[in-house]
Image (cartoon, rainbow, N blue to C red):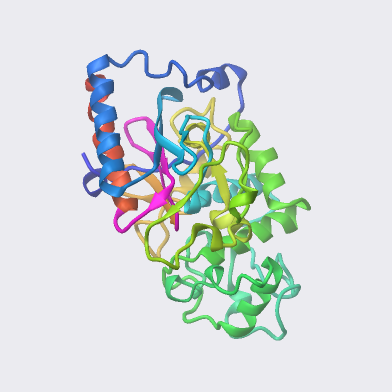
Amino acid sequence: MSRRHAIGVACIGGALAIPGVRALLRAATHASDDIPETERRAMAAVAESFRHQFDAPGLSIAIARAGRLVYAAAFGSADRDAGEPLTTASLFRIASVTKPITAAAIFSLFETRKLRLSDTVFGAFGILGTRYGRQPYASNIEQITVDHLLTHSAGGWGPEHDPMFSDTSLDQSELISHTLDTQPLLNAPGTVYAYSNFGYCLLGRVIESISGVPYAEYVQRTILSRCDVGDMRIARSSARDRAPNEVAYVGQDVPWFDPYALDVTRMDSHGGWIATPTDLVRFASRVDGFDASRDILRAGTIVQMTTPSAANPGYARGWNVNTRGNWWHVGDLPGTTAVLVRTSGGFCWAALTNTRTAGSPAALDDMMWELTSKVRSWKP
């Protein structure tokens, strides 16, 4: 079954952190021991076929079922030039798979009544006040709410005019001010869906304004630590500043798409994290809505987070969704392709690779549906 038929993807949800649950998601070394050897070979063949088709140096995969890690594997190279083999501990940029994590952080503030989704973001009564840009603001800016940012319906700053990939000489604060001053909204907030990295950058600043700590610190303390994830961090932009165990990225799109020319650090809350697939399924399994005893958000909060908006029936708040009960998010940047999936059948899985080519994001998603279909005991 492919994404086109069952579109499965990422997870959200919440409740309590319990040590016994953490133990279920710890070791990947023997995670696939219950899968027959013939089926593991078939899974590996699917993975290697993807690598060959897209000339991917490395591919790392993790799968959880009912909150338990059941498979983790790494194929190929972490650094092709250095001959460094990939391991399940290798870290990758996850690009827009960051968005479900940022959404969970926003909903943690919502649950503690530190914000409402209807709160406005800019202006005298907004969360961010007037600290960015010139006043008075252009038309409709002061009508943007937290929920508009979560649902990509703020009214502008969509893919055709995405500020996050422009002028790397500007720091984050300067970029926000420049955008507010020079890129007016195209539509009234709440009326039109336009996927916006900039909107999720603003959500990071909302988290900082309310929590009083940097975005990454809040997420690590409030979300990731409760999922037993300790290695995730915000990426650095240059090759020489790669984190320990971080892969080397290979750009294949076009000559000027250099993975290390991006200001990935500036992308923190919309595309800046590095992680392993196991980290991602640990997160997803704690927000999947299947078992309130392990979720870190309340059941009602998870429902709200995964209910599509009026602007787009296929996107909720940080997650793509469909009527089959699957949630997901795909991410890609030059040198990176990522997918995180939560299926209605109780699975959460993630796959990461250290390159991007035309078609690789959708193909990575399809690959995971094919790979999991090789295990007979996992079929409905």
Taking the image as shown, residue 142 lies to the left or right of residue 89, namely right
> Residue lying farthest right?
212
Q: Nearer the viewer, residue 188 or 274?
A: 274
Q: Nearer the viewer, residue 19 or 16?
A: 19
In this rendering, the answer to whether 139 lies above or below 303 is below
Q: Position of residue 31 (x, y in %)?
A: 42, 19
All told, the count of numbered labels is 0
In this rendering, the answer to whether 290 lies above or below 356 is above
- Residue occupying image coordinates x 63% and y 50%: 240
Figure quadrant of the N terminus: top left
Range drawn in magenta: 334-359
Instruction: Characterize the magenta stretch by its predominant secondary structure.
Output: strand
Taking the image as shown, residue 45 lies to the left or right of residue 78, namely left
Figure quadrant of the C terminus: top left
In this rendering, the answer to whether 219 lies above or below 40 is below
In this rendering, the answer to whether 310 lies above or below 302 is below
Q: Position of residue 274 (x, y in %)?
A: 56, 44
Q: Nearer the viewer, residue 267 or 14?
A: 267
Residue 176 makes an appearance in the image: yes
- Residue occupying image coordinates x 30% and y 35%: 47
Residue 112 makes an appearance in the image: no
Q: Nearer the viewer, residue 278 or 242?
A: 242
Q: Position of residue 66 (x, y in %)?
A: 41, 24
Q: Position of residue 44 (x, y in %)?
A: 29, 28
Taking the image as shown, residue 79 lies to the left or right of residue 45, namely right
Residue 65 part of the magenta segment: no
- Residue occupying image coordinates x 62% and y 39%: 223
Quarter location, residue 297 = top right
> Residue lying farthest front?
82
